[in-house]
Amino acid sequence: MLNSHRGDLGTYGKLFLHHSQNIIFTFKNRALVNGIALANRDKTIFCLGSDGSQQEGNDAEAARLAVAQGLNVKLIIDDNDVTIAGHPSKYLKGYDLTKTLSGHGLKVITVQGEDIDALWGGISSIITHEGPAAGSFLDFISVPSI
């Protein structure tokens, strides 16, 4: 794990780096992910996030930048229809994570997240795609109704 307090990569927060595989993981911060990807074009950068965070403006801007720059960014998104405000299917009619990410230009694979074979296939597909891609994993982490 890299910790910014030591100055690793000149970033804030925590990053997880596996040097032998040229892979970097981070959580949620898409702007940080793009910065890391710009500085490490020879690496695959993973960002773990949720459907709720994809509704934020900075995530949309980061997605478009990743596409425009051809960054090797891979998003793993838990699409469970739960946000801090409730259920998007109830308060934001018509919101569709797959259509949103596709509209930004990312390759998007949508699978049932609790189906291990589908999950593995989806992750494998985004990993092998050259350039930015996202996996929208439905109910990847089940949350009881609010």
Image (cartoon, grey):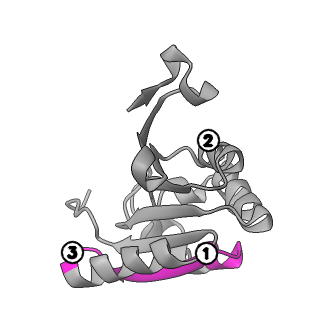
- Residue positioned most to the front: 20
In the structure shown, which secondary structural element does the residue marked by tag 3 occupy?
A: loop
Dot 3 or dot 2, earlier in sequence: 2
Tell me the residue that label 3 is attached to: 114
Tell me the residue that label 1 is attached to: 130
In the structure shown, which secondary structural element does the residue marked by tag 1 occupy?
A: loop
- Residue positioned most to the top: 5
- Residue positioned 42% across, 55% down in the render: 21
- Residue positioned 23% across, 59% down in the render: 143
- Left or right: 114 in relation to 103: left
Amino acid type of the residue that numbered disc 1 sits on in the rendered structure: Glu
Look at the picture and state if 118 lies above or below 67. Answer: below
Amino acid type of the residue that numbered disc 2 sits on in the rendered structure: Leu
Whether the residues at callouts 1 and 3 have beta carbons within 8 Å, the answer is no
Q: Is label 3 or label 2 in front?
A: 2
Nearest the eye: 90 or 141: 141
Q: Give the range drawn in magenta.
A: 100-116
Tell me the residue that label 2 is attached to: 32
Q: Residues within 10 Å of mark 1 (few under 14, many from 20)?
A: some
